[in-house]
Image (cartoon, rainbow, N blue to C red):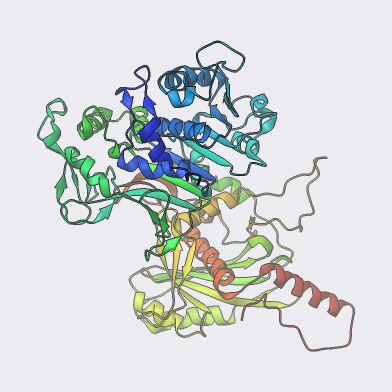
């Protein structure tokens, strides 16, 4: 007789899983909702090793995860561990979710002889049956990660876990180490998010091979879209009759505006709308309907990702007591209450909370870190770039030398005043870029190898024409993209309509990186001794003691402030320059960073190899070896 193939998680849960009255608003046989099906199948698929879920409350994540755990125990015969934030919550979880389910599921009782008695195999923190075991522990204690070897784990409410768990360090890594050696390791992590930059689920989602969002089709125009709260300036999202008091709102007074046709649909239509939902990765286009079969953007078959991130909000939930009306009422009650707003964003939208202003570097501290360079270009600086920011009556430019690990030395900051409508000012800028020469500490002269210029001002055509004066790939026609988490730089090798190649800078991404690099300093050794001042320090930014390197210069270098808001219906982070502040300095550094990164990513610049070639050249000169053909010190770039 042929062995029956294993059924998937949804088929098993719909047949065997039960919602007990002790822990469920609606008790009885489980029925998987359309948006839950793919997630449950991914949780139980051997092809997917890790699945992370950043979710809102009231979508059913905990029930889905419990169903997946029981499937892996009963149907796959595997042992696992459930981690809650601490032991107290672990015990509460057993009493609310595990023990009641066992009492209502004969299929589980059949492999758990001691299910109805107090026994060493049936305790508050451990269940052991025929060929399987399940531990339920708190993630706060290092001892709960010791001497446990499992085939699967479920980490619940991970943003309530400690940042570090004693000597075990990162509790996420400590938990994952319990799966080492398993034939089909499976890790499920999930929870409602908390605050950006200190969120476990945020870090896990960033590590995912694919982050999937649920797309549903508008019943009017069939456009697929994710359901988003929207916002004051968004053209789509949740809307309501603002002429009515919040308590008088009914289901017909709250609707969703389609991002395509701007038509309306209502919460009462949601169950039918979700029947055809797809889970799609915005960046790659990878998609699935059932969590088992995956497809590329062109609908060709694809392999399931090894690590999957899932984002879902309560807008998709079919079990909201008052539907979308309840969410609107909550929103209207928030007012200026910051804590209520944070709760709504975390619990109802499943979004990270970002503080209104990010940690801003201190201009005075940066000013105090200026250095007296041993030469115009210190020894570590090898590759010179320049970026030019255009204003209505002037150019402002910065020259930067780059070394190994993108350690940088700011060499020069210049301002050229003139009428940008006239060619004379552009000619002056060309002479500056072509003829500027800076003496290296070794004695040789270095010139600007690559430059970028802002094309987003009032002189776009003139800026593109200026780039065309130079050889291919020497000048970069740059424009900014301030959408958060965009790539630092995207360089198109294809010629555009302006006769140049577009170089797009992720401006907010660049500021994040720059502000982080402002903090980089050489670290002392175990004895407290600082390394050689000339030793490489990847990412560090150096400034000289120079007449242009003033307090006003550093005020511009830290001018941008992190804010939170909505963009096209999504909660986003963005940088903003306060009124009356100038930010040309940080704009120029953003541009230089993008230029050197474009040269590395797209044109073959290798700063480490450039350093090696440079050292070889200096050593051969010092040894007075017979003259030979000079080795080109390019680092792989022409």
Q: Residue at x 36, y 40 (%)?
A: 36
In the image, residue 261 lies at what x, y percent?
17, 56
Rendered position, 571 above or below 300: above
Q: Position of residue 250 (x, y in %)?
A: 13, 31
Q: Is residue 382 visible?
A: yes
Quadrant of res 146: top right
User: Is 150 left or right of 553, judged from the image as shown?
Assistant: right
Asked whether 489 or 630 is in front, the reply is 489
Q: Does residue 112 lie above or below 336 as drawn?
A: above
Q: Give the camera-side residue of 220 and 152.
A: 152
Q: Residue furthest front?
A: 1
Residue 48 in percent (x, y) is at: 51, 48
Residue lying at the far top of the rendered structure: 118
Question: Could you tell me residue 609's position as x and y percent?
Answer: 71, 71
In front of the other: 28 or 396: 28
Q: Is residue 213 left or right of residue 91?
A: left
Residue 354 at least partly seen: no
The quarter of the picture where residue 22 lies is: top left
What residue is at 48 percent from the left and 75 percent from the top? 476
Q: Find residue 571 and report its image quarter.
A: top left
Compared to residue 65, the image places residue 260 above or below, namely below
Q: What residue lies at 59% left-to-right and 42% top-to-bottom? A: 185
* Quadrant location of the C terminus in the rendered image: bottom right
- Residue 188 in the image: above or below residue 111: below
């Amino acid at each position: 007789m042929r062995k029956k193939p294993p059924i998937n998680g949804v088929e098993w849960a719909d047949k065997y899983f039960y919602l007990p009255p002790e822990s469920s608003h609606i008790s009885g046989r489980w029925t998987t909702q359309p948006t839950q099906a793919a997630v449950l199948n991914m949780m139980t698929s051997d092809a997917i090793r890790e699945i992370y879920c950043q979710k809102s409350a009231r979508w059913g994540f905990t029930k889905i995860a419990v169903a997946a755990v029981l499937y892996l125990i009963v149907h796959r015969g595997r042992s696992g561990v459930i981690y809650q934030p601490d032991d107290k919550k672990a015990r509460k979880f057993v009493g609310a979710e595990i023990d009641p389910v066992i009492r209502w599921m004969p299929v589980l009782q059949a492999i758990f002889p001691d299910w109805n008695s107090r026994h060493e195999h049936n305790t508050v923190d451990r269940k052991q049956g025929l060929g399987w075991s399940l531990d339920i522990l708190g993630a706060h204690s290092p001892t709960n990660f010791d001497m446990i070897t499992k085939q699967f784990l479920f980490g619940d409410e991970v943003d309530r876990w400690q940042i570090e768990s004693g000597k075990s360090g990162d509790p996420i890594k400590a938990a994952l180490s319990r799966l080492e050696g398993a034939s089909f390791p499976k890790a499920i992590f999930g929870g409602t998010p908390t605050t950006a930059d200190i969120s476990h689920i945020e870090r896990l989602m960033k590590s995912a091979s694919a982050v999937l969002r649920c797309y549903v089709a508008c019943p009017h125009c069939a456009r697929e879209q994710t359901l988003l709260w929207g916002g004051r300036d968004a053209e789509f999202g949740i809307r309501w009759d603002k002429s009515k008091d919040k308590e008088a709102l009914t289901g017909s007074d709250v609707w969703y505006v389609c991002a395509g046709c701007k038509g309306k649909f209502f919460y009462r239509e949601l169950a039918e709308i979700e029947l055809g939902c797809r889970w799609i990765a915005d960046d790659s286009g990878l998609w699935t309907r059932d969590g088992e079969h995956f497809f590329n953007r062109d609908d060709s078959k694809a392999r399931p990702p090894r690590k999957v991130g899932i984002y879902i909000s309560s807008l998709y939930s079919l079990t909201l007591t008052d539907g979308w009306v309840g969410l609107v009422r909550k929103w209207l009650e928030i007012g200026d209450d910051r804590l209520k707003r944070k709760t709504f964003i975390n619990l109802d939208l499943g979004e990270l909370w970002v503080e209104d202003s990010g940690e801003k570097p201190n201009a005075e501290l940066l000013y105090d870190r200026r250095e007296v360079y041993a030469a115009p270009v210190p020894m570590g600086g090898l590759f010179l770039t320049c970026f030019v920011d255009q204003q209505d009556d002037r150019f402002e430019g910065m020259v930067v030398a780059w070394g190994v690990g993108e350690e940088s030395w700011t060499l020069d900051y210049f301002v050229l005043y003139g009428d940008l409508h006239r060619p004379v000012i552009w000619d002056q800028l060309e002479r500056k870029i072509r003829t500027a020469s800076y003496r290296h500490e070794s004695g040789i002269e270095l010139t600007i190898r690559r430059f970028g210029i802002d094309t987003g001002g009032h002189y776009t055509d003139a800026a593109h024409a200026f780039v065309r004066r130079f050889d291919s790939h020497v000048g970069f026609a740059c424009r900014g993209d301030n959408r958060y988490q965009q790539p630092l730089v995207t360089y198109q090798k294809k010629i555009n309509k302006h006769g140049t190649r577009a170089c797009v800078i992720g401006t907010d991404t660049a500021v994040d990186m720059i502000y982080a690099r402002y903090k980089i300093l050489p670290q002392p050794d175990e004895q407290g001794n600082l390394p050689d001042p000339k030793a490489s320090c990847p990412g560090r930014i150096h400034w000289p003691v120079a007449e242009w390197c003033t307090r006003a210069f550093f005020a511009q270098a830290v001018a941008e402030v992190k804010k939170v808001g909505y963009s096209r219906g999504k909660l986003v982070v963005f940088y903003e320059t306060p009124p009356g502040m100038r930010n040309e300095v940080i704009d120029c550094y953003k541009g230089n960073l993008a230029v050197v990164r474009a040269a590395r990513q797209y044109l073959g610049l290798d700063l480490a190899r450039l350093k090696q070639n440079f050292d070889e050249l200096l050593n051969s000169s010092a040894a007075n070896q017979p003259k030979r053909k000079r080795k080109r010190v390019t680092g792989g770039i022409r």
